[in-house]
Image (cartoon, helix red, strand yellow):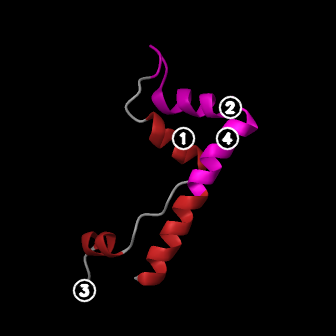
Amino acid sequence: MIDRKQIRKIIPKKPGDPIMQFLKEKKGQKAPEGEKWLTYWRAMYSKLTPEQKKNYEEKAEKAKEIYDKKIVQS
């Protein structure tokens, strides 16, 4: 029987959506005092202009293409 840890090594991790790409970029940066990190950065993402969000949408699309290629190769 295959262990979950072995499965995780075989199957690549799914890429995130545009907001996840944004959050990866902000990892390590602190939220203002009294703010929860995730809540703060999600609010900041929602305030981005469509042009700014397009960058993260492109990153998410590229990550999904790479993921799909890895899945096919597995």
* 44 w.r.t. 11: above or below: above
Marks 4,2: beta carbons within 8 A: yes
| Residue 30 in sight | yes
The amino acid sitting under disc 1 is: Phe
Give the mark count: 4
The amino acid sitting under disc 2 is: Leu
* Disc 2 from disc 1: Cα separation: 11 Å
Which residue in the structure is indicated by mark 4? 53
| Residue 17 in sight | no
Which residue in the structure is indicated by mark 1? 22
Q: Residues within 10 Å of mark 2 (few under 14, many from 20)?
A: few
* Label 1 vs 4, first from the N-terminus: 1
* Label 1 vs 3, first from the N-terminus: 3
* Disc 3 from disc 2: Cα separation: 47 Å
Main secondary structure type of the part rendered in magenta: helix
* Disc 1 from disc 4: Cα separation: 9 Å
Residue depicted at x 62% and y 52%: 58
Which residue in the structure is indicated by mark 2? 48
